[in-house]
Amino acid sequence: MATGWAIAVGLIIVAAAAAGTGVATGSAGIIAAMAAAIQSFEGWRPGSTSFRNNNPGNLKYANQKGAVGCDAGGFAVFPTYEAGRQALCTQLAMAFNGTSRVYTPEDTLYNFFSKYTEGDSIPYANFVADKLGVTAHTRLKDIAPA
């Protein structure tokens, strides 16, 4: 029960923070929902890599703001869950608003997750699309216009 409460509070904090990233205010909810779906797909639970690293998106280390280094697998390590969640939301906001060097608003969820994950991206894209109420062929800009 406490974990669910912490996640809900984290979503509220992240939604408020994402509103200041250059993405339209209405997009903050989409970013929070997509971050929550990614966290779920990544298997966030005690003992998991993402949990140990306070990295709910299992982001690879790329000198992200707030990261304190990386683990042996190259995943970013954050000092707190909130810092890791904010890094994920910042990455998503950059994809939606066109400021990412990797992702573009033209990317479909299939395209996005083929770049995001090292594994099979099709189940990942389908899982997130289902959570967002769209298809995996939907472009980011059609989910949350910048």
Image (spheres, rainbow, N blue to C red):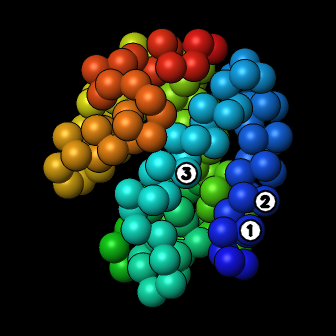
**Residue 120, x across and y down, in percent:** 17, 49
User: Which numbered disc flags the more N-terminal residue, 2 or 3?
Assistant: 2
SS for dot 2 = helix
C-alpha gap between disc 1 and disc 3: 13 Å
Give the amino acid type for the residue marked by disc 1 in the picture: Trp
Quick one: 132 or 44, which is closer to the camera? 132
Displayed quadrant of residue 113: top left
Quarter of the image for residue 109 reads top left
Residue situated in front as seen by the camera: 93 or 29: 29
Residue under pointer 3: 36
Q: Amino acid at mark 2?
A: Val
Specify the amino acid type for callout 3: Ala
What residue is at 42 percent from the left and 79 percent from the top? 48
Graded by Cα atoms within 10 Å as few (under 14), some (14 to 19) or many (20 or more), the crowding at tag 1 reads few
Residue 19's disc is none
Asked if disc 2 and disc 1 are in contact, CB closer than 8 Å, the reply is: yes
Which residue is tagged 2? 9
Q: Dot 1 corresponds to which residue? A: 5
Picture residue at 45% right of the left edge, 51% below the top: 38
The secondary structure type at the circle numbered 3 is: helix
Please give the name of the residue rendered at 45% of the width and 86% of the height, measured from the top-left corner: 47
Q: Quadrant of the C terminus?
A: top right
In space, the residues marked 2 and 3 are separated at their CA atoms by 12 Å
Q: Residues within 10 Å of mark 2 (few under 14, many from 20)?
A: few
**Category of crowding for the residue at label 3, using alpha-carbon neighbours closer than 10 angstroms: few (below 14), some (14–19), many (at least 20):** many
Q: Quadrant of the N terminus?
A: bottom right
Percent x, y of residue 132: 47, 33
In the rendered image of this protein, does residue 46 appear above or below residue 15?
below
Q: Residue at x 47, y 49 (%)?
A: 37
| 53 relative position to 12: left or right | left
Residue 28's spot in the image, x, y percent?
70, 32
